[in-house]
């Protein structure tokens, strides 16, 4: 959390001319994880940091997390249950792999509000929404359900939603045409490579295609590849970067480092969070130059920390779904 807020401030203040790929991609894929309402601040950086990290007024939530951890430790029967994200304080945004697994691989059990709006299951449900006749134009349009409203809020055009609905209604399958409509409709992140209406017909081939496309998108595609990242590797990178920043500030005996690590007993209880808050609050020029240099010296991208040689684009996913590809390619996982 500290690193992401520091990186955003360095970018906004112009100390980093070009965002570091890894942090920029994480910010786009997990916006609400790092910033309130998913909006990275352009000013009042300390206020934004406190909004995400302050325990003030959230004692009840803290007790709930502790209770959840105790329950998990007693009842977990496998690694998936042991790593249940519901006990996390910050990182709760689940991948589609998590969501399907928790629903025992039955899409009908997944509530609309739990779906990522760019997921294929969300697209499929929007496509199945009963069309209504627009009084002004006389054209059929999708009903303004909660899922449709979320899609609009995410930047998907109404006309694109109508087109997706028409394709699914006409073709009755999730084929390349639907994939092209999805690609045109969905505002995908610009990677630098660098209780709603339940789904219907869960045993149909189309549902299996939807599940397959969601898993491909989650694991090895450019759409929303939350499960492609080696999180252990990235965590180590975050830690090493903060150690580098601390080391340079300590060597210079920078006043902010002294305040957080040696002088203020209250700050010393959470040294790194305190140092981050002081930097965000003071916007000390020397300190920001040191931090910006640390980011530049360790510049890296998402692709350097994922399990695969490359990520599939939507056209590749579409070819796998409509059968134009004779067989799945050989696995390219650098770990497997």
Image (cartoon, grey):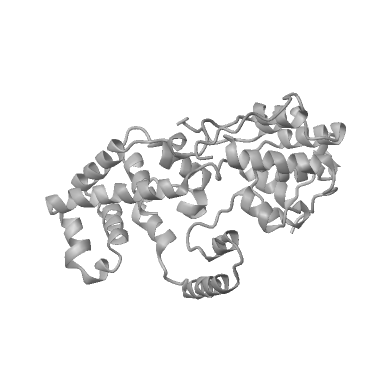
x, y (%) of residue 51? 43, 60
Residue 123 is left or right of residue 332, and the answer is: right
Residue at the front extreme?
336
Q: Considering only vertical position in the picture, is 79 above or below 140? A: below
x, y (%) of residue 19? 38, 36
x, y (%) of residue 69? 52, 71
Q: Residue at x 50, y 56 (%)?
A: 91
Quarter of the image where the N terminus is located: bottom left
Residue at the left extreme?
252
Q: Residue at x 64, y 48 (%)?
A: 116
Q: Quadrant of residue 23?
A: top left
Q: Residue at x 58, y 53 (%)?
A: 94
Q: Quadrant of residue 173?
A: top right
Q: Considering only vertical position in the picture, is 22 above or below 258? A: above
Q: Residue at x 29, y 59 (%)?
A: 272
**Closest to the observer: 243 or 3?**
243
**Closest to the observer: 71 or 189?**
71
Task: Note whether residue 325 is visible.
Answer: yes
Quarter of the image where the C terminus is located: top right
Q: How many marks?
A: 0
Q: Considering only vertical position in the picture, is 42 above or below 329? A: below
x, y (%) of residue 52? 43, 59
**Closest to the observer: 336 or 188?**
336
Residue 143 is left or right of residue 248, and the answer is: right
Residue 164 is left or right of residue 334, and the answer is: right
Task: Note whether residue 142 is visible.
Answer: no
């Amino acid at each position: 959390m500290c690193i992401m807020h520091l990186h955003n401030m360095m970018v906004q203040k112009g100390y980093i001319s070009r965002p570091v790929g890894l942090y920029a991609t994480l910010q786009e894929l997990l916006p609400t994880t790092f910033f309130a309402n998913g909006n990275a601040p352009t000013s009042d950086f300390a206020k934004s940091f406190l909004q995400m990290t302050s325990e003030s007024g959230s004692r009840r939530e803290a007790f709930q997390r502790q209770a959840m951890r105790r329950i998990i430790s007693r009842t977990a029967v496998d690694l998936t249950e042991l790593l249940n994200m519901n006990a996390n304080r910050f990182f709760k945004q689940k991948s589609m792999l998590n969501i399907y697994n928790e629903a025992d691989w039955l899409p009908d059990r997944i509530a609309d509000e739990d779906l990522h709006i760019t997921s294929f299951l969300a697209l499929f449900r929007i496509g199945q929404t009963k069309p209504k006749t627009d009084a002004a134009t006389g054209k059929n349009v999708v009903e303004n359900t909660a899922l449709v409203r979320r899609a609009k809020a995410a930047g998907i055009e109404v006309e694109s939603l109508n087109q997706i609905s028409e394709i699914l209604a006409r073709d009755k399958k999730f084929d390349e045409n639907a994939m092209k409509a999805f690609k045109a409709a969905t505002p995908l992140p610009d990677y630098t490579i660098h209780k709603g209406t339940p789904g219907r017909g869960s045993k149909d081939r189309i549902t299996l295609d939807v599940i397959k496309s969601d898993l491909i998108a989650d694991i090895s595609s450019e759409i929303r590849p939350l499960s492609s990242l080696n999180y252990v590797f990235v965590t180590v990178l975050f830690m090493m970067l903060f150690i580098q920043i601390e080391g340079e500030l300590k060597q210079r005996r920078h006043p902010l480092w002294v305040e957080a690590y040696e002088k203020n007993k209250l700050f010393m209880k959470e040294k790194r969070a305190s140092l981050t808050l002081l930097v965000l609050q003071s916007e000390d020029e020397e300190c920001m130059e040191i931090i910006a240099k640390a980011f530049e010296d360790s510049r890296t991208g998402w692709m350097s920390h994922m399990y695969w040689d490359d990520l599939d684009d939507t056209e590749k996913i579409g070819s796998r779904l409509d059968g134009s590809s004779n067989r799945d390619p050989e696995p390219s996982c650098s770990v497997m």
